[in-house]
Image (spheres, helix red, strand yellow):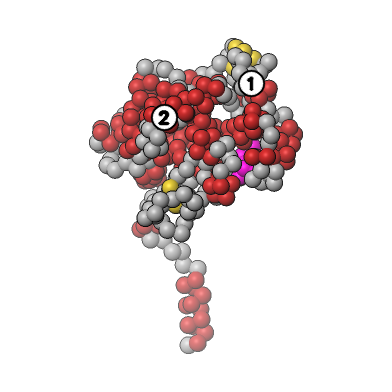
Amino acid sequence: MKMLIIKLMLALLFIPLVTGSAMGPQPEELTGPQLCYSERPSSHLELEELFSSHNYGWGTLDDGIPSIFLEALPSDLDRIPQVQKKKIVFFLSLLPVVLRANEEIREHKTTLTDLLRRYDQGETLTGNELARLSAITTEYRVSGDPLEDLQTRETLLMRVDTLPTSLVLAQAATESAYGTSRFARLGNNLFGEWTFTPGTGMVPLDRPEGRTYELRCFSSIYESVASYMNNLNTHRAYTSLREQRARMRAEGRPLQGIVLAAGLTRYSERGEDYVKQIRTIIRSNRLHRLGSILFRQNRAAETEETAPFSAGLLSSAAPSSRLSALRKNP
């Protein structure tokens, strides 16, 4: 009898656990891309050496940029004596991350439009495809069924879209003091994002009495950029920005950070003065020129005619590529 019990127990161990829920589509969450982070540079000199080893600088942008995804900025950017050099190091540090975050949004948009198109053509979506659609809907904080409800679909399509590189970099520069603020150095918080869960963030030294918000902490620069983009793409405070972006798309116009900055009046208590500052940073640093930058593996396949950069912070003696509409409007 004892041997029989042992045999039964062994048999049970090898019975496959298959249930109705296990066989069906499982809930899916959108996960960020698998990035290969470089080692965290301990100083701005080490960071500059990293860029130099990859031939990465303002003069080589037309050749594409390397896939350098910094986990965090060095803590001594404030020790760079030349203001222009500090700006360049900061923008170069964030540029690959911003481009990759926009690529991820494009991937979401491609998946979304493909699923909607196939459904409209009468195809039956699989369980996994429905789960993917649900994950995108949840990620962009839209309630309702985009397959059947046209208003839900319109809202979702308006939210799943990229942001101009110029706008992202200008806000990062403003909110993090070009990567030198305490929140940027200690928590990778480049956009001043808040959290209202006590103990999960950093308490601002100048927080008014009675307020409970904290500054969020992020595990990487990429996480901070992705969170900020999701914030602009979903929060009701930036509805006007998304509506203006949709109009520009419908008219076939390239997205411009200068224009979309008008939708940031509620990002700061400074309102219109904040918008003016963002626009000044974009203009003075000619950040709108970064809208045509590609990763090197993508630049190698680009064959369209070239045109030179204009003079300015981002000027280069090398020609600048004119890109397809998809790449021209990051």
Vertically, is 23 above or below 12? Answer: above
Vertically, is 146 above or below 19? Answer: above
Residue at 73 percent across and 32 percent down: it is 52
Amino acid type shown at disc 2: Asp
| Label ID, residue 175 | none
Identify residue for label 2.
Answer: 273
Residue 11 left/right relative to 46: left
| Furthest-bottom residue in this view | 1
Tag 1 or tag 2, which sits nearer the N-term? 1
Q: Is residue 303 visible?
A: no
SS for dot 2: helix
Residue at 34 percent across and 37 percent down: it is 237
Residue 56 left/right relative to 252: right
Give the Cα separation between the discs numbered 2 and 1: 33 Å
Q: Is residue 258 visible?
A: yes
Residue at 55 percent across and 38 percent down: it is 177
| Label ID, residue 62 | 1
* Image: magenta residue range: 68-74
